[in-house]
Amino acid sequence: MSASPLLAVAVSGRGLVEPGEPVLAADDEGFTRGRAAFETMRVYSGRPFRFEQHLARLAVSAERIGLEPPDAAEIERLAALALEHAGTPEAVLRLYWTPGPPGGEHCAIALVSAIPAWIEEARARGQHLVSLLQPRRSAPWLLPATKSTSYAVSIAAEAEAKARGADDAIFVDADGIVLEGPVTNIWWREGDVLLTPSLEVGILAGETRAALLELAAQTGQVVEEGVFPLERLLAADEAFTSSSVRELMPVVAVDGRPIPRGPAAVALQETLRQEARA
């Protein structure tokens, strides 16, 4: 699924630049080795949702991959500059923090793009997922819960899912334990209880995931975090994924096995948008 065109770009030390203008040094390890941290969030009514939490997670990811702490004030300034220039209240904001060239300064980049048009179409029809084997990232050196630009495996997983006739993938480990999607967290409902994999299995602590846990608690929805086999997901009464840009995406089949659509995803999607625009 192709990305939307850039609406605005702001770079540390330079401010606004034209979207097609180069912004990284050719020897920046964020480019040459994928050693950079990033965050993606959705903008509602001109305000990035959970901006402070995303910025905090950016700092954690930077520390784990050996980068200096991000300049939070500069990144916030760049984000505001890019959003103002983009001039659209509903958008996608991406923040990058790279090490820069050897001996040089770190680089902060803020990108604003339109919300991809395919998302609402996919939400309306629901998504078909295929399970793919992925080792559990539980050891610290595997950088669990780290959001870096080393995204080749995620891209390959999405391509493999499409090659198998599905929309997206869901990772399971060698023991058949459900982990996460390439860019999403996974949820499902069993009766009145929502289930989602625990962070102990090495998945990314998604900010939309965190928001949904808070909103579920506020509305009295029971959520169980745990270590669950794929069979539990395949037998679900309802399933959906969550991510910052896609929000909640209903899942209508996994590995060719149909899963009914249900009320939880609809209710939480509405509650999420109300919270984001409050």
Image (cartoon, helix red, strand yellow):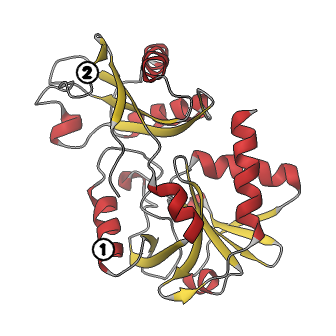
- Residue 203 coordinates in the image, percent (x, y): 51, 58
Q: How many marks?
A: 2
203 versus 71 height, above or below: below
Query: Considering the image in quadrants, where does the C terminus appear?
Result: top right
Q: Is residue 95 left or right of residue 235?
A: left
Mark identifier at residue 160? 1
User: Helix, strand or loop at disc 2?
Assistant: loop
Q: Amino acid at mark 2?
A: Glu
Horizontal placement of 25 versus 257: left or right?
left
- Identify the image quadrant of the N terminus: bottom left
Amino acid type assigned to the residue bearing label 1 in the image: Glu
The relative height of residue 154 versus residue 53 in the rendered view (above or below) is below
Question: For the residues carrying marks 1 and 2, which lies nearer the camera in this image?
Answer: 2
Q: Which residue is depicted at the point 43% across and 47% down?
A: 146
Evaluate whether residue 225 shows in this view. Answer: yes
Residue name at image x 56 percent, y 50 percent: 205
Of residues 277 and 232, which is closer to you in this image?
277
Other residues around mark 2 within 10 Å, as few (<14) / some (14–19) / many (≥20): few
Whether residue 15 sits left or right of residue 197 in the image: it is left
SS assignment at label 1: helix
Q: Earlier in the sequence, mark 1 or mark 2?
A: 2
Q: CA distance from mark 1 to mark 2?
A: 34 Å
Name the residue carrying label 2: 18
Give 155 or 274, whichever is nearer the viewer: 274
Q: Position of residue 237 (x, y in %)?
A: 72, 81
The residue closer to the viewer here, 60 or 152, is: 152
